[in-house]
Amino acid sequence: MMPKVALVFGTRPEAIKLAPIAKILSTIPTISYLGVNTGQHTDLMPSIMERFGITTSYQLNLMVAGQTLIELETHLLETMTQVFEIEHPDAVIVQGDTATAVATALSAFHCGIPVGHVEAGLRTYLRETPFPEETFRRIIATFSHWNFAPSDHAAANLASERVPGKIYVTGNPIVDALTTIVHAPHDSNAWPKQRKQRRIVATIHRRENHPYLPQIFTALSALAQYPDIELFLPLHPNPVVVQAAHEFLSHGQVEIIEPMEYESWIGFLNTADLVISDSGGIQEEAPILGIPLLIAREETERPEVVSGGYGYLVGHNRDRIIDVAMETLNGHVRYARGSPYGDGHAAERIVDHLLGEYGLTASEVMPLANNN
């Protein structure tokens, strides 16, 4: 009987990282592929699905304005259980550490369905850094039959925790996805033109940074005062971030812009001389693009970025952010180029391992390598 594999995503990062896997699964005749979009993110998602050719059998639209995280998780758990009771998939694949991922994994566990976790093993071992993601990914590890770790370090974390599922080092499919985007034609009119010698792009949004937004934003404002620097901040819609931005950013200098479609965003990010961010995704994207990165956090669940010299932790101290940023722009800080997360064939490895669980041969995946 043909195994049915459900890929469940709800946020933009999940869609991007699961897209290369979905692309392969949907072309294998011995696999029945089921795509489920929970709708945790509604903005900017359609373009991703169109760009990567993601098909969905379920578009759930579970995000409701004003609902709490607990309400969202409850809604996700109930609805995904209903989907699984209708579809009876043989395996469920989730990615990362979102509410969609943890609720889907829990639902699959209750329904007796094996779970595969993409990007497994990321840890800070600090329960609230980042919150709630650190706890979510550790919960998912207790349900997962297959842990697809992006690095040896992530795999070692899982092994030390004695997780019940199998552990595979596959790389991170963000490399697969980003390689496809970088090599695609870009509309350079989609992002602001360079007006000054040096460009900084910043993104700040994490919950644990909310108390420190005044320090971070005043550091960005100070950097934007230099006559040869232009600084852009795509503004995250979280009300706390928006309020702090309006209060602490020098709007005559820092250029606040709207979030972009992902392909345009990567093109714009690629024009930066420096990135300052607390985003987990940008810790993966900037090294691939070869852009110097300052991580506005005290800890990171992606230590390979720091240990490999791809980026540096600067925390939320105003003076440290300014000092390291200027040292970087002046060429006094050395950065590695490339990616600590694989060679762009993570999706093939993940599907290869999955096929093996059902006694199917790797040869059904490998001919697709040149198409991914």
Image (cartoon, rainbow, N blue to C red):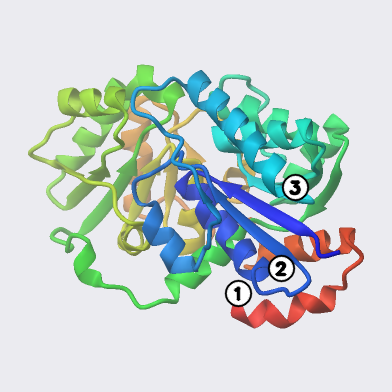
Q: Residue at x 87, y 73 (%)?
A: 361
Query: In the figure, is residue 363 to the left or right of 220?
Result: right
Q: Which residue is mark 1?
A: 372
Q: Amino acid at mark 3?
A: His
Q: Amino acid at mark 2?
A: Glu
> Which quarter of the image is occupied by the C terminus?
bottom right
Q: Amino acid at mark 1?
A: Asn
Query: Residue 88 — which label?
Result: 3
Q: Which element is circle 1 on?
A: loop
**Which residue is situated farthest in the left direction here?**
252
Q: Nearer the viewer, residue 255 or 10?
A: 10
Examine the rendering and report whether any part of residue 148 can be seen.
no
Asked where in the image residue 5 lies, by quadrant, the reply is bottom right
Q: Which numbered disc, 3 or 1, marks the residue that appears first in the sequence?
A: 3
| x then y, percent, for residue 193 | 17, 63
Q: Which residue is mark 2?
A: 348
Q: Which numbered disc, 3 or 2, marks the residue that appears first in the sequence?
A: 3
Q: Disc 3 versus disc 1: distance between alpha carbons?
A: 28 Å
Question: Is the C-beta separation of discs 1 and 2 under 8 Å?
Answer: yes
Q: Residue at x 72, y 73 (%)?
A: 28
Q: Disc 1 versus disc 2: distance between alpha carbons?
A: 8 Å
